[in-house]
Image: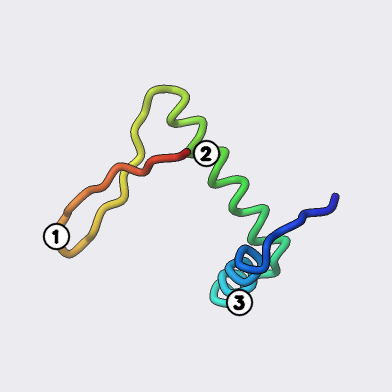
């Protein structure tokens, strides 16, 4: 499989992989699992939120 990314996307992939101490392949696999999990929840009618711990403010995660 070949994955073609823009320079900006490749930079983001490099930065995320380095900051997480992961290979780029491992990061892409993890991202796919996360996307699958979120998609399954949304498809079943659930809502997904991100909460700011300091204020308990919640924002709904929107997947385009």
Q: Please say if the residues under marks 1 and 2 sit with CB atoms less than 8 Å apart.
A: no
Task: Say the numbered circle drawn on residue 55.
Answer: 1
Query: Residue at label 3?
Result: 18
Residue 25, position in %: x, y? 73, 61
First in sequence, mark 1 or 3: give its number: 3
- Seen from the viewer's position, the closer of residues 19 and 13 is 13
Decide: few, some or many residues near mark 3? Use Cα within 10 Å; few <14, some 14-19, many ≥20.
few
Q: Residue at x 61, y 54 (%)?
A: 30
In what element is the residue under mark 1?
loop
Decide: few, some or many residues near mark 1? Use Cα within 10 Å; few <14, some 14-19, many ≥20.
few
Query: Residue at label 2?
Result: 37
Q: Residue at x 70, y 69 (%)?
A: 23
Whether residue 42 is situated above or below residue 6 in the rendered picture: above
- Indicate the quadrant where residue 56 lies: bottom left
Decide: few, some or many residues near mark 2? Use Cα within 10 Å; few <14, some 14-19, many ≥20.
few
Residue 63, position in %: x, y? 45, 40
* Residues at marks 1 and 3, CA–CA distance in whole angstroms: 30 Å
In what element is the residue under mark 3?
helix
First in sequence, mark 2 or 3: give its number: 3
Whether residue 5 is situated above or below residue 44 in the rendered picture: below
Whether residue 58 is situated above or below residue 11 in the rendered picture: above
Residue 17, position in %: x, y? 62, 70
The single residue placed furthest to the left in the displayed view is: 55
């Amino acid at each position: 499989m070949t994955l073609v990314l823009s320079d900006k996307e490749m930079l983001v992939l490099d930065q995320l992989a380095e900051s997480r101490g992961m290979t780029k392949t491992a990061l892409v696999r993890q991202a796919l699992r996360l996307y699958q999990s979120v998609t399954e929840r949304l498809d079943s009618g659930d809502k997904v939120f991100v909460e700011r711990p300091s204020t308990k403010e919640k924002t709904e995660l929107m997947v385009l």
